[in-house]
């Protein structure tokens, strides 16, 4: 296997669920080497859930690979549940899981929303983080949310036109509120229809070149519902305070080894945000992939992420 390729498919050696509140139960799994270096994978979205492919960023001979579905996502239950679901809750879940698995410190790997959660978790518990691999940086600021809702049409006008067409003209001044009303509707058909349109919009904008496979997967019911409801909920109800908290608190994690991987032509999480993080945190290695968009499955992104986990073997 050439360095930089994904590792071969593998199955988990252990799976489980963890009741993290009276409402939420999260799914987790372990793969690779039970005695290896612990690494936790944080999926994007929020709400996207993890997939078997995500195990393949890590050498299974070296790493004890921990993967979870965050609250309301993937195999965690209840799917799409927005109550008791905020950044402090997700940080607490990671700490509960780390304790249950008897892990002292772990490498934290997160892309897109996963980079947001990875930074927030590391800043809350720096003593538990051996290193960070971050991809497609999202810092949860209003300018980034507005970009997603309105300005991605600069590069993907066709996808945005379909996204906005789902909302009546008189509601288009506040797309987030319009979608949130539909995604939280009592009518399951209304929720599902809005979720599919939202999720497919994001999928269509996530790669440098068109990917019909990704767009098709984005419309799958469970994925779409978890992703769209969680994203709308977090964008609307879980702003950071202060808004630039993840940048302002970099001193808490400046000493932690980190690698930032960013696609030059990432439209979902534009490179401007990664550049701001890099300038605030020059100690972190910063890798710009010149021929990639947002998706972790872009060839150049995929290769850079595997190379990053290979470098961390010596940590």
Image (spheres, rainbow, N blue to C red):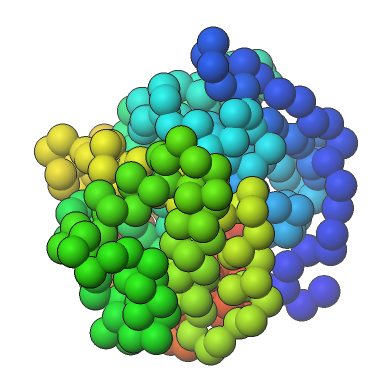
Figure quadrant of the N terminus: bottom right
For the residue pair 99 and 74, the one nearer the viewer reads as 74
> How many numbered marks appear?
0
Q: Is residue 113 above or below residue 34?
A: below
Q: Is residue 169 above or below residue 18?
A: below
The answer to whether residue 151 is visible is: yes
> Which residue does the image show at 42% across and 40% down from the upper left?
185
Quadrant position of residue 218: bottom right
The answer to whether residue 310 is visible is: no
Q: Is residue 44 above or below residue 210?
A: above
Question: Is 11 left, or right, of 313 in this rendering?
Answer: right
> Which residue does the image show at 56% across and 21% down from the upper left?
24
Residue 171: x and y in percent read: 21, 60
Residue 304: x and y in percent read: 56, 71
> Which residue does the image show at 35% across and 80% down from the upper left?
161
Question: Is 160 left, or right, of 175 in this rendering?
Answer: right
Residue at the far top in the pictured view: 22
Residue 134: x and y in percent read: 45, 56
For the residue pair 162 and 37, the one nearer the viewer reads as 162
Question: Is 224 left, or right, of 179 in this rendering?
Answer: right
For the residue pair 189 and 96, the one nearer the viewer reads as 189
Residue 91: x and y in percent read: 43, 28
For the residue pair 228 and 147, the one nearer the viewer reads as 228
> Which residue does the image show at 51% across and 24% down from the upper left?
93
């Amino acid at each position: 296997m050439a360095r930089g390729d994904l590792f071969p498919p593998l199955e988990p050696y252990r799976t489980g669920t963890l009741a993290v509140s009276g409402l939420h139960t999260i799914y987790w799994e372990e793969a690779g080497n039970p005695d290896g270096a612990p690494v936790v994978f944080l999926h994007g979205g929020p709400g996207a859930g993890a997939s078997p492919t995500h195990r393949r960023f890590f050498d299974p001979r070296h790493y004890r690979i921990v993967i979870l579905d965050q609250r309301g996502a993937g195999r965690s239950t209840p799917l799409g549940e927005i109550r008791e679901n905020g950044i402090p809750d997700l940080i607490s879940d990671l700490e509960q899981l780390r304790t249950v698995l008897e892990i002292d410190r772990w490498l934290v790997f997160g892309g897109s929303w996963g980079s947001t959660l990875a930074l927030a978790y590391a800043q809350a518990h720096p003593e538990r983080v051996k290193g960070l691999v971050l991809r497609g940086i999202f810092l949860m600021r209003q300018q980034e949310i507005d970009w997603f809702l309105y300005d991605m049409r600069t590069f993907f006008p066709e996808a945005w036109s379909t996204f906005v067409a789902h909302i009546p003209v008189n509601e288009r001044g506040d797309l987030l509120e319009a979608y949130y009303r539909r995604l939280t509707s009592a009518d399951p058909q209304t929720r599902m229809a809005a979720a599919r349109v939202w999720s497919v919009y994001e999928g269509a904008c996530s790669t440098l070149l068109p990917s019909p496979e990704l767009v098709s997967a984005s419309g799958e019911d469970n994925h779409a519902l978890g992703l769209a409801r969680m994203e709308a909920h977090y964008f609307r109800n879980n702003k950071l305070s202060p808004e630039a908290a993840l940048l302002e608190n970099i001193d808490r994690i400046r000493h932690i080894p980190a690698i930032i991987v960013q696609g030059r032509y990432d439209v979902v999480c534009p490179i401007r945000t990664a550049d701001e993080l890099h300038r605030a945190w020059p100690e972190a290695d910063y890798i710009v992939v010149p021929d990639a968009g947002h998706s972790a499955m872009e060839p150049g992104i995929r290769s850079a992420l595997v190379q990053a986990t290979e470098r961390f073997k010596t940590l």
